[in-house]
Every structure is written in C-alpha cells, then in structure tokens.
Amino acid sequence: MTRNSCTSTLSLASLAAAAALAQAQTAPAGAAASQPASPIEDWIKDAKNPVSWLTWGGDLRIRNEYYDNSVTLSQTAVRHEQDVVRFRGRVWATATPVKDVSLNARVSAEPREWLRPSFVGAYRGETGMEWRYGILDNLNVKWNNILEQPLTLTAGRQDILIGDFYDWWLVADGTPGDGSWSFYLDALRLSYDAADIKTKFDLMCIYQNPLPGEWVPTIGRSSFNGGATSDYPITDQREKGVIFYVSNKSIKNTQLDGYFMYKGDDRETFTVKGAPSTPGDDADIYTVGGKLTGTPAEHWQYSLEGAYQFGTKEDRILGVMAERDIDAFGAKAKLTYLCKDERKNQLSLIGEFMSGDNPDTTGRDEMFDVLWGRWPRWSELYIYSYIYETGGKIAQMNNVFRVGPSWTVAPVKNLSLSVMYNAMLAPESIPSRTVAAPLFSNSGYFRGHYLQNVLKYQIGKHAAAHLWGEFVWQGDYYTRRDMLSFIRAEIMFTF
C-alpha cells in the first residue's frame, strides 16, 4: 500500500467510524428531547468520580494532516508536500483534599506518523513513527475563596486563554514549538471578582522554559537522536512575563476589557541535527490594549480589540543582528449577525491589522509581536507560511491586513459548516526577518486570497469529527504564484 493510500484509508476509516458511532449514539428522529441516562453513561459517570474528592477523564485525538507549499511557498522546493498522522492522548485528574483547594494534573503525548519526509527541525527529512516524549502539561494548585474573599490563586503549569472564545489574540499558547499538542504556561494567576462593580481583576506572572523537561521531567527523552541529536524546544527563547487584565460588565450587554502585558525574551541556543541553532531573540516588549464586546440588538454581536507595543528587541534583521526600539500596533474587529433560524445561520465580517517592520526606519522596529498568541487562531495553514518570513518562527504573524466575510450554518442536527474568505495584504512589502529572501518579491503588497471550509459533526457525547480545508492563492507579495493548501481529517474521542 502506498503512503497516499494509507492516508486516504485513515481518513475514510475516521469518517466510517464517525458514521458508525453516529448510528449507535444519535437519538432517532422524533425521540423525546430528554432521554434517561443509559447504563453505560451511568458507569462512565461513576468511573470518572470514584470518590467524592477525585474526578478524572481523558481524550484521544487522531488527525491526518496534508500540507502542500504552506511551508516552502514553492512547488519546486524539497519537502513542499507533507503528510502526517498525529495521535494525541491525554489523561487528567482533579483532587480536592480540602474545601476550596484543588490539585490539577494532566499528562499528554503525541506520537506522529510521517508519511512523507518531515519538515520540522528535530525530525527533518525523516519518515515513519516519531515517538516523542510524554509531558505533564498541567500541574497546578488552585485555591478559591481565599480568606472568605472572591479571590482565587492558581499556581503552577496551567492553560491561560485570554479574549473571545477561540479568538484569543495575545495569550493562548505558551508552547508553539509542539503545535497544538500542548499550550500551557508556567505561571501564577491571582483573580479577584468584584461582583458589586461587575469587574474582574487578573494578575499573572509567567516564566516559560524553552525546553520541555527543565522544570518537570518528561516521560521519555525530550530530544531526538537520529544519528545527530536534536532538541525539541517548545518555544524559541526563554520567556518571562507579567499580565494585568481588567474586565468590566457594568454597562448592559457590553463588556469592556483593558490590559497591560510585559514579555521578556532571553535568547537560547539549541541543538538541531547536531549543530547549534539560536532562533529566538532578546526583547523587552510592553503592550497596552483594550477590548470592547457587546450585543447591541437581538441579532447582532460585535468585538473590537486594539493594542500598542513599545520596548526593545534584538534579533536578526535583513541578516544583521540589531537592537531597535519597538513602535508597533495591532487591531481586530468582528461584526456578526445571528439569524436565529432553525439552521443557526450566522454571517460575520472580519478584519484584522498587525503592523510590519519598515526596514528603512533606522533604530525602530514596527513589527507587531503576538506574544503568547502563536497558535492557529484563524488559520491552520497560514501560520506555517511565516516560518521563512520571520526568522524560522512558526505563527509569528505580523505585517498583515486581512478582511472578509464568514458564514456558519447547521444544515442538520449535530452537523455544522463554516466558510470564510479573506483578502490579505502586507502593509510593508519587504519582510525584514526573512531567511529565504528569493521567495518574496520585495515590491508587492498583496499576500493573496484565503479560503477556509470546515465541516464538523458531533457524534453523541463522547466523539466528534471534522474535515478542514484551507487554500491560499499567492499574490504579488511573493515571488511565485503556487497555491498553498491544508487538508485535515480528525476524529476525537472523550471519556
């Protein structure tokens, strides 16, 4: 069986499993809205909560991902075509030994089967099963109602997601180096909920090690030795930070947020294929911003967010290591109309701007930094296209203005379809941090046309599947006009 046949077989098997589970778990048409719990559901509930002070659970996610040109930006480049199957398994538990105090842990692993030679640093050029390490990607203590006050402290390895759901802009993923496998931050978070003034205050302190086993040992070796050792860094530099975030809901149907963020980067040297590599930067980045969201009328929703950055950053600009003063800004907006019909139609208009560096300004760096927001917030494909544009960093998105509509519909029960189009431009025609200058025209401002299609199906309580496709038709910002593509089939089981 060929590799492409294996890929097709896995995708079809995932969909076949989804269909079989759907037949087994979906209530028949005309069934009562409320069904009594089945013996299996009762058993699962009891198994996940064996004693009053302990709960646990787990999930298994299987993804078959196919990329073409999304990293290389060229059909003629080596390894322009990628095909990988990712198996992520997680188990988590929460223990509550005393009132208001919980201990939380989660262990995760994601081996990957490369059907074509891999593009990633540690496993570059390899095929077959990449047996990566397992990691405790959550390990924290949470203390609620401290001193009988609406005060909560979470200390340790935790997930921190700030902003609109699934549109977390600047804080979401502290581990961009391992993809969507984990997204934790090693942090202290103190939250105070002042209900009388409808305001919540959050103070967060972050210290992120670039290698996964520095503070908490991994399960198995967190490096690859395929003749020459390669590290598996989870981020490109050592990072520390402070975040102060305030959210107020005193105005009806409106939420107003304000924030200050500091991120300090310290450059680190890693080993890739036995050779030293220093992909990161030295930086002190200060960000001030605000967000306004609301529902002004029955069918309408909106979200507006903007931020300004200042400070200093030292990294490689046009091939030369230089320190410059940061003067950057970004903004995003979304306006949604909810039809509230039986098909759950929603129509949105989306816009986003993130400034790019102007290489002609001496001593100043206008590149907006997404801080801990390097994850596929709006595109699974386009985050990879930035690798050659931003010094080898994945998802370091900047120098982009995008605008376009989206549509979401639920044609039948448990099935949803979403379609999004963006026209994408580059405010600056020259990518100052490129490591592959021939791929960029240095004279064009149109990045290209972007199209996303996502089909999701919820299979009862314990499984879900989706088919995801993205395409970019390159514009004159690039040298070539090859189409970039990303296709994914996924099935996820949850216990």
Image (cartoon, grey):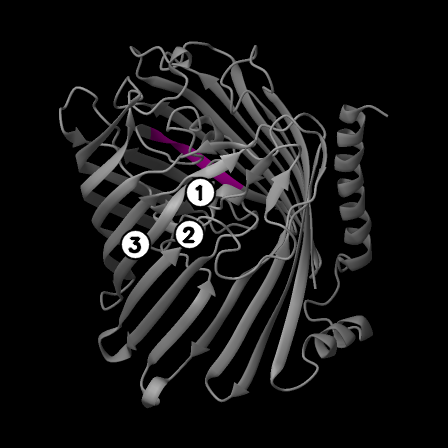
Q: Considering only order in the chain, which callout, 1 or 3, is on the residue closer to the N terminus?
A: 3
Q: Considering only order in the chain, which callout, 3 or 2, is on the residue closer to the N terminus?
A: 2
Q: Is residue 296 visible?
A: no
Residue 23 location (% of width, % of height):
81, 53
Q: In this orientation, which residue lies closer to the viewer: 415 or 28? A: 415
Q: Quadrant of residue 48?
A: bottom right
SS under mark 1: loop
Residue 173 location (% of width, % of height):
44, 50
Residue at the spot of label 3: 293
Q: Is residue 406 visible?
A: yes
State left or right for residue 344 relative to residue 493: left
Q: Residue 295 magenta-drawn?
A: no
Identify the magenta region. 402-408
Residue at the spot of label 2: 172
For disc 3, the neighbor class at 10 Å (few under 14, some 14 to 19, many from 20) is many
Residue 399 position (above or below residue 215): above
Q: Considering only order in the chain, which callout, 1 or 2, is on the residue closer to the N terminus?
A: 2
Q: What amino acid is found at the position of numbered circle 2 in the picture?
A: Ala
Q: Quadrant of residue 65?
A: top right
Residue at the spot of label 1: 377
Residue 59 location (% of width, % of height):
67, 58
Q: What amino acid is found at the position of numbered circle 3 in the picture?
A: Thr
SS under mark 2: strand
Q: What amino acid is found at the position of numbered circle 1 in the picture?
A: Arg
Q: Residue 407 magenta-drawn?
A: yes
Predominant SS of the magenta segment:
strand
Name the image quarter holding the C terminus: bottom right
* Nearer the camera: disc 2 or disc 1: 2
